[in-house]
Image (cartoon, helix red, strand yellow):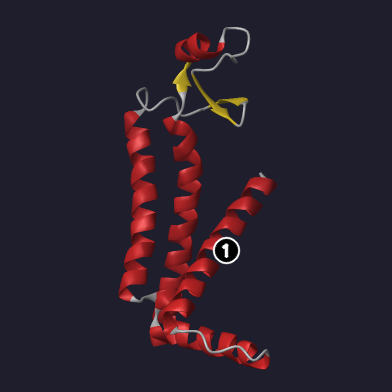
Amino acid sequence: MKTVKMLIWCLAQYLGAMLSLLAFFVWAPWIGAHSHAEAVALYGAGKVPDCDAISVNHGQFICEPWGTTSSNPWGFALCTAILVSGVGFVAYSRATGKGLFSTEFCGALGSRVNAVRARFGRPDLEPSRVQSLAFGCLAASAIVTVLLVSVLM
């Protein structure tokens, strides 16, 4: 039963990290979105596409379907809440030692990593380093998932 709870926490942490990352990729350009009138004033009429909300990403104009922060404040607030709650959930679960950051998971991960390190004559990792490794694996898996989803769409 303890293993099932740990796996549920691991899945929840993965989903929290992935949702936060996806929310960030919507949230970040949303902050910089301008209305059509503002964009024409900033960049000139010939350059700006005909959209309600426009952001500039690495020199490219992008039509934002969700509008600007002022034209859709509730949507922006929801996106911000998703971003903050996902990051907060992962931070809380790390601070309380749940799932990927549990003693059982980090102990198992640490023993495997230390066995490989021993083959190369390297000293054992400290438990805090193993927990950081688990966090890095969580972040990397969320990033890879988001990249795969963006490529497939």
Q: Callout 1: helix, strand or loop?
A: helix
Query: x, y percentage for residue 153?
Result: 66, 44
Q: Residue at x 52, y 27 (%)?
A: 64
Q: Is residue 30 visible?
A: yes
Count numbered badges in the picture.
Answer: 1
Point out residue 78 in the picture as x, y percentages from the top left corner: 35, 41
**In front: 82, or 55?**
55
Q: Mark 1 sits on what residue?
A: 141
Residue 4 found in image quarter: bottom left
Q: Position of residue 121 (x, y in %)?
A: 64, 91
Identified at 36% across, 75% down, the residue is 98
Q: Residue at x 50, y 48 (%)?
A: 22
Farthest residue toward the top?
A: 45
Query: Would you call the spot at circle 1 few (<14 residues within 10 Å), some (14-19), or many (20 or more)?
Result: some
Residue occupying the point 35% across, 69% down: 93
Quadrant of the rendering where the N terminus is positioned = bottom left
Question: Which sits in the foreground, 138 or 16?
Answer: 138
Q: Indicate whether 85 appears above or below 73.
A: below
Tag 1: amino acid: Ser
**Residue 8 in view (yes/no):** no
Along the viewing direction, whichever of 98 and 133 lies nearer the viewer: 133
